[in-house]
Amino acid sequence: MSAVDDILAEVPMDQLAAQLGVDQATAEQMTRQAIPALLGGMQANTEDPGGARSLAGALDQHPSDLIDGGVDLNQVDADDGEKIVGNIFGPNQDQVAQTLGGGLGGAQTGDLIKKLLPILAPIVLSYLSKRFLGQNQSRGGQNPLDSILSGGASGSSNPLNDMLNSMLGGGAAGRASGQPAGGSILDMLGGLLGAGRR
């Protein structure tokens, strides 16, 4: 199961559709576009050591309890989500939403994606926090985010970038399965990614 499907399984689609004012099929279609865009934006930012530190700090503040046992959207802080989206996409966030919306059918969809991204961003961070801390289970009680926060991740030893890369199909497993999780969406967004917080 891909990371996108994993995250999607945690989101109550009926609740989300009601918040967006659309049917569940439309809400799911938009969510399938938005999750790879968020992951791709984070991955592009973690290629820079400052971006990796910024994301590590965000993961440290977003434990997995939001997604444990399934998400209740009433517990999602959309103001916090707005900040996360701003940190991920920087000045390109409106353009990212409109580009994703264009791929689904126009300007109105772009406005809905703009509303959707801040709802999904804290959920995606909680999922990443769970995956990252689970993969790097405390060796001697040390939080694996600490080494990134202290500037220990640079060049090829950037575990956050490695994890996001493999989720998006950039790792060996993704290439073997033939289809990157967010391939065409990331191609569509192209140069809009990587403008986030350093």
Image: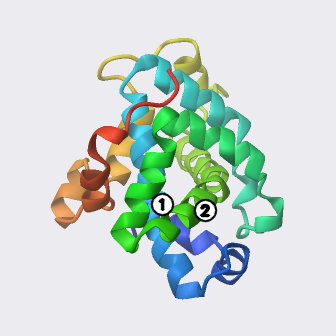
Residue of label 2: 116
As drawn, is 9 to the left or to the right of 141?
left
| Image location of residue 160, percent across then percent down | 45, 34
At x 66%, y 73%, the residue is 20
Percent coordinates x, y for residue 172 in the rendering: 21, 50
Q: Is residue 64 visible?
A: yes
Q: Are marks 2 and 1 in contact (CB under 8 Å)?
A: yes
Task: Give the CA distance from mark 2 to mark 1.
Answer: 8 Å
Query: Which label number is shown at residue 34?
Result: 1
Most extreme residue toward the front is 107
Instruction: Please give the name of the residue rendered at 29% of the width and 23% of the height, measured from the top-left corner.
Output: 156
Who's the residue at 63% across and 71% down the image?
A: 11
* Nearest to N terminus: mark 2 or mark 1: 1
Task: Name the kind of residue labelled 2 in the image.
Answer: Leu
Label for residue 194?
Answer: none
Question: Under tag 1, what secondary structure?
Answer: helix
Residue 84's place in the image compared with 57, above or below, is below
The scheme the figure's colours follow is rainbow
**Relative to residue 95, is residue 29 depicted above or below?**
below
SS for dot 2? helix
Q: Amino acid at mark 1?
A: Ala
Looking at the picture, how far across and down is residue 2, in whole percent?
39, 65
- The answer to whether 99 is drawn above or below residue 73 in the figure is above
Count the marks: how many?
A: 2
